[in-house]
Amino acid sequence: MQENIFKALSDKSRLRIIKMLQKKPLCVCEIKEILQLATSTVSNHLSVLCDAGLVNSEKDGKWMNYSINTEPKNNMISSALLYLQFILEDDETILNDRRIISNVDRNVLCCK
């Protein structure tokens, strides 16, 4: 489990995803738009985050929503998520991602 958490946190894109999901649940197409990465790359990042227990997924109609795990099953995940609330808060990339989140409309993006 510990290796999965460290692996999940070792990538800048995955950290960006976590910081986005701290603001609100998002679907793959929204995350793809913000990160400007291929859908398959975003899906792989989300799979790593889910496997580590940091992120949950939930089907909602035609969308799969991803959110921060609010009920982690062990203390290591809880500690990592708590720590992640406070890091990178003044990082320019994270701040820019948060500005973009407010303008992203999944109904437009997912119909492209």
Image: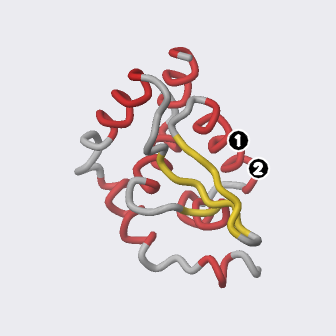
Classify mark 2: helix, strand or loop.
Answer: helix
Q: Which residue in the protein does label 1 denote?
A: 44
Q: Position of residue 78 (x, y in %)?
A: 38, 30
Classify mark 1: helix, strand or loop.
Answer: helix
Measuring 58% from the left and 46% from the top, which residue is drawn there? Answer: 56
Q: Position of residue 37 (x, y in %)?
A: 65, 55
Q: Which residue in the protein does label 2 denote?
A: 40
Residue 46, compared with residue 34, is above or below; it is above
**CB atoms at circles 1 and 2 under 8 Å apart?**
yes
Q: Amino acid at mark 1?
A: Asn
Circle 2 residues within 10 Å: few <14, some 14–19, many ≥20: few
Viewer-closest of 27 and 74: 74
> Left or right: 98 with respect to 34?
left
Q: Position of residue 49 (x, y in %)?
A: 58, 37
> Left or right: 12 with respect to 44?
left
Residue 29, compared with residue 102, is above or below; it is above
Measuring 47% from the left and 48% from the top, which residue is drawn there? Answer: 68
Q: Amino acid at mark 2?
A: Ser
Viewer-closest of 85 and 109: 85
Colour setup of the view: secondary structure
Measuring 31% from the left and 36% from the top, which residue is drawn there? Answer: 82
